[in-house]
Amino acid sequence: MNFFNSQNRHLLISELKKKTFDLVIVGGGITGAGIALDAASRGLNVALVEKGDFASGTSSRSTKLIHGGLRYLKQLELALVAKVGKERAIVHKMAPHLVRPEKMLLPLFSGNIFSKFILSVGLFLYDRLAGVPARDRYQMLKPSEGELLEPLLSGIPIIGAGYYAEYRTDDARLTLETLKTAATFDARCINYVQAQSVVYDSAGKVAGLACKDGLVGDEFQIDAQVVVNATGPWAEKLKNLPQSKKLFLTKGVHIVLAHELVPIKQAIYFNHSDGRMIFLIPRGRATYIGTTDTPHAGSPDEVKVAVEDVEYLISAVNQVFPTLNLSIKGVESSWAGLRPLIFEEGKKASEMSRKDELYFDSSGLVTIAGGKLTGFRKMAEMVVDGVINKFFINKKEELGKAKTKSLKLFGGEFRSYHEVEKFFVELCARAKPFGLVRGDVRELVFCYGTRSSGIVEEYIRGVEGGLMKEEALVQATLGYALKEEMLLKMVDFFNQRTGKLFFHISEIKKDMPIVLRFMAEHFAWDEARKRKELDTLKKAMFDATVVLR
Ligand code: FAD
């Protein structure tokens, strides 16, 4: 049974009600997804509930880099740099189409906090700690070499540049593919189900989770021996954090502009005059820029981009690249995410550690807080090792060690990035006679990996059946999301499934009627439900652009 087929949701809910699970995870971001995959692949019975769509929290609102955290070198967190640096290579192997190598250019200006010497030592350490292979190690470039790689730097008084290896990803897709892979090991993962409280038996031990179906309002219980709270910024709501530990939320904002307004040839990372590091990253037809780091005091459900955030990023870029002359009018879309940091007395937001911390409660409630997208696999291994040692010690031999290092994520069945490129070229040849250009195919391959060939075949059937190119492509990807990715709401197709809400917002108006018609037929929506879906989508578009009006 494919429990990621949206038509099977009622069957999934009846399983959740009937079965007793070893552990139930709360939170369908990358942390929960990683734990579900690790635990299920070792043989534990796993359920996971997510109150919104999968990856609708921080895990669709990051900078989308799988990185070793060069900035942590500044804070001398060498162990953290080494840990996440090594993980990059492992996560790349799990999904080479989705976690792709990307060179980063770090220009140096006179008066920079990085001198050439310090940067060179930093990048040397960074490469060694992260175990970067010799062919990919950093280079220090002269100004003329930097300009050659990035023509936008010409005319700007740089004294040199660092050029080093990073990886990029799509955070929401990475989360989805991790969850889908967990489901192949029988994990039962469901979106739009909110955990309301932990249920205890008369001896004070965890007995399960009281839940509410966010679509139809039904309340039900999932029986489980252990509850893992992987709710990121929401962690204190189901908490077992010790009194001494508090979450400290900081907001990070990104803005998106058309690539022609910020025509970078490759990713750039530069030091702003206030000391913050800013990324400029090309993605298809757009460039995105981030990020800010300011305390967030309100509810994690209400995190918004403020006009000051956008102005800060625009002015940071204009300071370094004055010829771009960016203004708020050029910004197409934006997003804000929350970093759940562990509060440290006397430190500024940007100085607090990004380390993960794990808390066990002998009753069976486990909380994981902090962490990074990059370290999700390792963090999951640590959580599941801890869960087995505390609660399933009698099954330790049978469950064994983590298997995720050698797993392939759904769609990631490539041996190397070279194979991804070969697959891309072959798919281009297949799709070209039917009107798909290289850019369309590249987006499909980067999103769906090996599964993009099935989507292309569906697209071809649509075109041969008389559909226009755009309609056939939307229907093919939408059909896939409904059958394979538990798509339940229209807004989620444009957000977590395809990223169009942020990276191609102007296309949504054109796609909207096709998506509405197709989904309404699929789910037999009445007029009221159709209106609600449209309103929700329009609100998300408004939120992504509100400060830009
Ligand atoms: P989330 O993704 O927030 O997931 C928690 C989930 O729990 C949410 O989906 C929420 O809806 C759900 N939930 C909450 N309460 C309940 C409930 N009661 N019942 C059911 N579900 C519930 N890391 C990197 O490695 N690289 C980067 O480039 C990077 N950039 C970043 C940039 C920014 C601006 C930010 C904020 C973070 C960045 N990070 C980055 C960190 C990374 O994004 C986070 O560490 C990671 O996404 C956290 O995932 P999570 O699953 O813990 O939290």
Image (tube, rainbow, N blue to C red):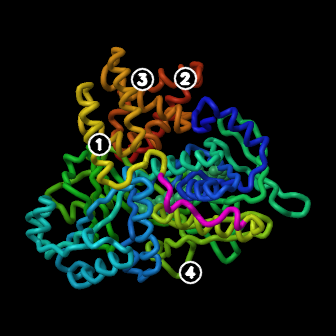
In this rendering, is residue 528 above or below 265? above
* Residue carrying label 2: 522
Q: Nearer the viewer, mark 1 or mark 4?
A: 1
Residue 165 numbered mark, or none: none
How packed mark 1 is, by other alpha carbons closer than 10 Å (few <14, some 14-19, many 20 or more), is many
SS type, badge 1: helix
- The answer to whether the residue labelled 1 contacts the one labelled 3, judged by CB atoms less than 8 Å apart, is no
Q: Position of residue 253 (x, y in %)?
A: 40, 57
Q: Which image quadrant for residue 12?
A: top right
Of the residues under marks 4 and 2, which one precedes in the sequence?
Answer: 4
Q: Position of residue 65 (x, y in %)?
A: 38, 60
In this rendering, is residue 369 above or below 208? below
Q: Residue at x 78, y 70 (%)?
A: 362
Q: Residue at x 19, y 51 (%)?
A: 263
Q: Amino acid at mark 3?
A: Ile
* Residue carrying label 1: 424
Which quadrant would the N terminus be assigned to in this image? top right
In this rendering, is residue 514 above or below 278? above
Q: Amino acid at mark 4?
A: Glu
Q: CA distance from mark 4 to mark 3?
A: 52 Å
Residue 345 numbered mark, or none: 4
Of the residues under marks 1 and 2, which one precedes in the sequence?
Answer: 1
